[in-house]
Image (cartoon, rainbow, N blue to C red):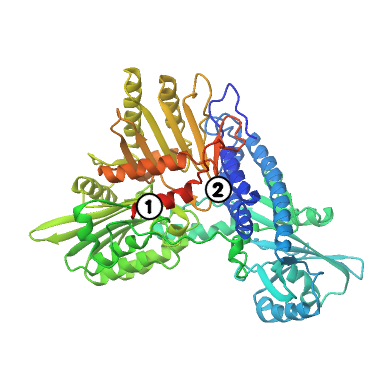
Amino acid sequence: MVKNNSNNIYINRELSWLQFNARVLQEAADKTVPLIERLRFVGIFSNNLDEFFKVRYATIKRIDEAGKAGKSELGGIKASQLLEKITQTVIKQQSNSLRILSNIQTQLEKEGIFIVKEDQVNDDQKAFIKNYFIQSVSPALVTIILNDSIKLPNLKDSAAYLAIKMALTDGNYQYALIEIPKNMDRFVVLPKVGEKNCIIMIDDLLRYCLDDIFNIFDYTSISAHMIKITRDAELDLESDLSKSFMEKISDSVRDRQDAEPVRFVYDKTIDKKTLRFLMNKMGIDASDSIIPGGRYHNRRDYMGFPSLGRTDLLYQPIKPLPVKGLSLETSIFEAIAKKDYLQYTPYQTFAYTVKFLREAALDPKVKTIKITIYRLAQISHVASSLINAAKNGKNVTVSMEIQARFDEQANIEYAEQMQREGVTLYFGVQGLKVHSKMCLIEREEGDKIKRYGFISTGNFNESTAKIYTDYTLFTANDKILKDINKVFSFFQVNYRIYRYKHIITSPHYTKNAFFNLIDNEIENVKTGKPAYIRLKMNSISSYKMIDKLYEASKAGVKIQMIVRGICCLVPGVKGMSENIEVVSIIDKFLEHTRLYIFCNNDDPKVYISSADWMTRNIDNRVEVSCPIYQESIKSELLDTFDICWNDNVKARILNETQDNTYKRNNLPKIRSQFATYDYLKNKLN
């Protein structure tokens, strides 16, 4: 539980994030969630935690090691105190996750699915394991023999290792490490026992085969315990002027494997002598987060737990809906020329985005295509469409963000491929990440050039579009698209600051533009006019934006906020934020939309945006918030906000205590993600 005190008007960002991850873990504990999906939420929780330590914990550790308190940046808590608080919170959450995992496994056994250990296999399974080890595991195995005279090679970030201790017949001990191969399935399906489905984790398969691995050693006993190290993932870009920006990013990504450790997780049953030996070898010290865990680490792998054909233990897949009025079989430009359309993934199909780009690639009248790219799918139809367009003689310009965290290498590879095919690439703007999601094409129609485009809240990524909720506006509104074209001009000439009549852009205008919209609500409430603010975002951590919302609350403006992740704002405090309510929704899909609604005297101003209200989005990124002018789309966005706000199944109330209490009332049950799908489906009639 994260408590606020009277001297602190903000909740610390890192502790708020940990409470968000606790909400993810609540899904793993929720008995109404299908059983294998619950396992996958354990995996998401673990994967989130890995990234948190690589980035946020590492940053705070840097502040602490620089001898800075960091209180002003960290919401009133010293960096050293925060490091300790994070570790203690994570230890409790990890312990809770182990209890939840144990409960899930018990429930799986009732469904005839058994995760067996190395000492629980029968003769047929033993033979299968031996053969599987020889054929599939042994060739990929990396085993490191440890001794005092040889320096330990750098262990891979977030890889799991089995720490081996052998008691030799001569009275000495021999230590070793086995790297758990990342390129193979963590879960091995064994031959069934009657009607029982049996799965062994690769960790235990290796434990079963220890004698085969270490048969050259003469030992009386052998033990294996899991360890994992997490390293600082911040990119340190060198200043070598002879290297291109892309080369610097590539080198820095490689250097992550040698970065300082920030977390060490170990099996708490390991003996103390072995633990001390390993920590000394790896240079683990008291400033690192040292977390005792269970028998297994890298629980993120549970995201890929085999379904074994048990669709009854999974969420039933939804069939993505069409967008009324748009067709995948006729020209999308002809439809957009008449009016705007809104695509809401994953409820509606992402195929319209690909269709738009494919049509642009083939249409002889299309002369230019400009697009921003942040994260691409592993196999990207978006990228292939752009390459296709370049081959067809279009002038294709891509602003590729190659500092998209943990996707740097994939983006570099796509960037190199596009460059080879004649695509013009810009790698962002110095000192800024390009996080805006937009595309603009110019099409020759008669003796004029007509613009078409789309602006989105999410990445142009076919994979995440199946699980992330995002809005995409398709438009031929030249007022908006002229502004979008200015953003692309800014990528080329970034010393020139453009003025925009319709869109709101970071880093130059976002804060002031939203301040003006909030001030308008404050003025309206003071003069007795209708006033409210409704916000939906991933995170809010900008103290300036929070202070402005506090000001609006004090003036009497009613504020409803749906915040999935970090929320540094403290709602419901008398004299400060009593008019602010905040909920967070965690469910089947990841809530990723950013939607900003201002009453404007009952003539709502509505924006979809790529930007959260975080300092990085407002001051350090290129972001675009796009106004919605078409009344039918505006009405749909207002409706979908209301559906989410009225969720009384998966919504948690965020308050001063940050205890993730579910929103409950006596109204009919509304599970917003399912209700949103039904709402959009009904609109097709």
Up/down of 295 relative to 671, above or below: below
Mark 1, other Cα within 10 Å: few <14 / some 14–19 / many ≥20: few
The mark nearer the N terminus, 2 or 1, is 2
Q: Is residue 423 visible?
A: no
In terms of depth relative to the viewer, which is nearer, 71 or 600? 600
Which residue bears the numbered disc 2? 55
**Residue lying at 46% horizontally and 31% vertically, measured from the top left:** 543
Q: Position of residue 439 (x, y in %)?
A: 29, 55
Disc 2 vs disc 1: which is toward the camera?
A: 1
In terms of depth relative to the viewer, which is nearer, 317 or 141? 317
Quadrant for the C terminus in the image: bottom left
Q: Is residue 324 visible?
A: yes
Q: Quadrant of residue 526?
A: top left
Tell me: 499 left or right of 237.
left
Q: Amino acid at mark 2?
A: Val
In terms of depth relative to the viewer, which is nearer, 303 or 138? 303
| Mark 2 element type | helix
Tell me: 28 left or right of 233.
right
Tell me: 221 left or right of 543.
right
Q: Position of residue 279 (x, y in %)?
A: 74, 53
In terms of depth relative to the viewer, which is nearer, 131 or 57? 131
Query: Alpha-carbon distance for marks 2 and 1?
Result: 43 Å
Q: Position of residue 212 (x, y in %)?
A: 78, 77
> How many dots with numbers?
2
Quadrant for the N terminus in the image: top right
Up/down of 175 relative to 288, above or below: below
Mark 2, other Cα within 10 Å: few <14 / some 14–19 / many ≥20: some
Which residue bears the numbered disc 1? 682
Q: Amino acid at mark 1?
A: Asn
